[in-house]
Image: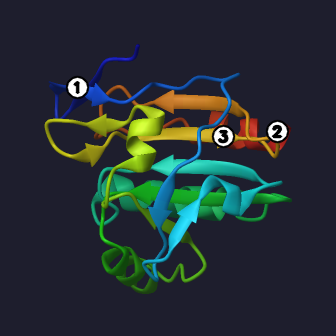
Amino acid sequence: MVQVTFKQKPVTLGGEQRKAGDKAPDFKVLNNASEPVTLKDYAGKTKIISVVPSIDTSVCSQQTRKFNEEAGDLENTVVLTISVDLPFAQRKWCANEGLPNAITLSDHYDLSFGKAYGVVMEELRLLARSVFVVNSDDEIVYSEYVEEGTNHPDYEKAIEAAKLA
């Protein structure tokens, strides 16, 4: 089990942590139109799931932009950014950042994704910075729980895992 800190303070991660080789659990989140979305909506595709505490902060914004720019052209691959930000805030961020095609998903309602992937920072009710690459058969082929929540993930390893998925 990975121990995570946020701003150098330990946090408790709620839910079951996932690793490469695990079957990707389903989840229910909201898209920018507040419509429900599940893992099954991306069936048959490789999924880079980029998890951020709050999209409108520096590292989270950079993470979202970098994955969309670096992996957006990978064949049969989607980049899903998940946070607990409200759908309208995510939509506004996409418009302000010039990324209208970025897929941002909100887990604010019941933390379905966060609990299924073990990324709920219980003390903050935010999602811990993490990355999961899920292949077209819905198997996790890469997972990273960033040990300090204000640090960046390993972009290169995640993108390489997506290319090999």
Q: Please report the residue visible at 54 percent of the width from the left and 35 percent of the height from the top.
A: 154
Q: Amino acid at mark 2?
A: Ala
Disc 1 to disc 3, C-alpha distance: 23 Å
What amino acid is found at the position of numbered circle 3 in the picture? Val
The residue closer to the viewer here, 17 or 104, is 17
| Quarter the N terminus occupies | top left
Horizontal placement of 24 versus 137: left or right? left
Q: Amino acid at mark 1?
A: Thr
Q: Quadrant of the C terminus?
A: top right
Give the crowd class for mark 3: few <14, some 14-19, many >=20 residues within 10 Å: many
Q: Please name the residue that numbered disc 2 is placed on.
A: 165
What scheme was used to colour the molecule?
rainbow
Residue 92: where, in percent of width, then height?
Answer: 36, 83
Which is closer to the viewer, label 1 or label 3? Answer: 1
Sequence-wise, the earlier of marks 1 and 3 is 1
Residue 81 vertical position relative to residue 142 in the rendered view, above or below: below
Q: Position of residue 2 (x, y in %)?
A: 39, 17
Task: Name which residue lies at 20% across and 36% down.
Answer: 122
Q: What percent of the width, then of the height, locates residue 158?
A: 64, 38
Ranked by sequence position, the earlier of labels 3 and 2 is 3
Q: Which mark is residue 133?
A: 3
Do the residues under discs 3 and 2 have CB atoms within 8 angstroms? yes
SS of the residue under disc 3: strand
Badge 2 element: loop
Q: Is residue 67 left or right of residue 104?
A: right
Disc on res. 12: 1
